[in-house]
Amino acid sequence: MRSLIILLLASWISLAARGGDGHRGEIVVKHFLAPSIKGNHGGEDPMRSVSVYLPAGYNESRQHYPVIYFLHGFYMNDSLQLLFTSFKDLLDQAIEEKKIHPVIVVFPNSETHFKGSFYTNSALTGNWADFIGKDIVNYIDKNFRTIPNKNSRGLAGHSMGGNGALKVGMLYSEVFGSVYALSPAVLSWSNEISVENPVFRIIDTLKDETPLKKVLTNPFADTTMTGFFTVLMIDLGRTYSPSENKKPFQAKMPATYNGDNITVHDDVKKLWEQNFTLNLVDSHVKDLKSLSGLKFDWGTLEENKHIPVTCVQLEKKLDSYGVKYEAETYAGHHSDKIGGKKGRVYTAMLPFFESHLKFE
């Protein structure tokens, strides 16, 4: 797995270095000091990378372009997201085949030490919603020829990034005009996202992160996915219920164990619920109604059982408030139908933004 990633990264770096050839776009990678992450107490690096797709002809013209901001998933970053979805090729083809007008696409790096920011402002790890809604947008508008208004900005993401697109879209509805969430994950409690998940018992036994080293490097190192969910819950704790002096992970957990006996900590559980994107809808109805377009989807074969359940819950909540949206299911698992010309990015997400972005 690691050798494959290294090989893919080498190919991507080579491609990025070549840039556009007059018929194709190019990827440029920038680094900047993010004000919203600077000074965090969780050890996260405020020097962030951002990968930017520039359409063919960008360097030869004076044209200004709309922007799609794409948020990556858990265990991902900007460069891995580009590789995983073959985004550059898809965008080149979509523009050439007129699926979408020429557009800038931005991939911010929101990876943390425990693999996910959940695009949430955290007292420990930094303000990751602000990182997207303020830092990244300001940086892109200052350094690239964008159309700097909300109706020419779209926000999208997959998995954790789908969650983030919905959350940041609500919190920054004055910045983004349309939102597309692919398979949004961890919107609320359900199924494996539960205080009954046995990984909380494992977390109780850990004195430090040493037993997690392998799975932090490679999420597939543990085929049972126990390690994956252990890292996920630690990350959510550091994000939703941080406690700087609490060892070893600077976080309170909603469930702890004494032998075989579980104790659910309602105060911590409530903190998680206050941060769950599904629950933010109640206080952001006006923001959701201000969007020109809102869509989310999920696969009928989704292996993360909480996702279909919470997506249906989101549908019901939006219906109850009279929020206009689109929701769609498709025959697929969590990730297998995202990339490629038959995948959701090409066949659904890009046409959605073609319909909802203002291109001039």
Image (cartoon, helix red, strand yellow):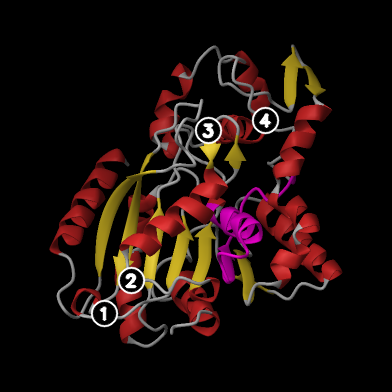
Q: Quadrant of residue 313?
A: bottom right
Q: Residues within 10 Å of mark 1 (few under 14, many from 20)?
A: few
Q: Position of residue 239 (x, y in %)?
A: 60, 35
Residue at the front extreme of this rendering: 142
* Residue position marked by numbered label 1 in the rendering: 62
Residue 125: numbered disc: 3
Residue 337: numbered disc: none
Residue at the right extreme of this rendering: 320
**Spatial separation of the CA atoms under disc 3 and disc 2:** 31 Å
Q: Residues within 10 Å of mark 3 (few under 14, many from 20)?
A: many
Q: Position of residue 308 (x, y in %)?
A: 69, 59
Disc 2 + disc 1, Cβ < 8 Å: yes
* Residue position marked by numbered label 2 in the rendering: 145
Name the residue rendered at 61%, 65% in the picture: 174
Residue sitting nearer the eye, 152 or 269:
152
Quadrant of the rendering where the N terminus is positioned: top left
* Nearest-to-viewer mark from 2 and 4: 2
**Spatial separation of the CA atoms under disc 3 and disc 1:** 39 Å
Q: Secondary structure at mark 4?
A: loop
Magenta residues, start to end: 161-190
Q: Earlier in the sequence, mark 3 or mark 2?
A: 3
* Residue position marked by numbered label 4 in the rendering: 241
Q: Secondary structure at mark 2?
A: loop
Quadrant of the rendering where the C terminus is positioned: bottom left
* Nearest-to-viewer mark from 3 and 2: 2
**Spatial separation of the CA atoms under disc 3 and disc 4:** 11 Å
Q: Position of residue 129 (x, y in %)?
A: 56, 48
Disc 2 + disc 4, Cβ < 8 Å: no
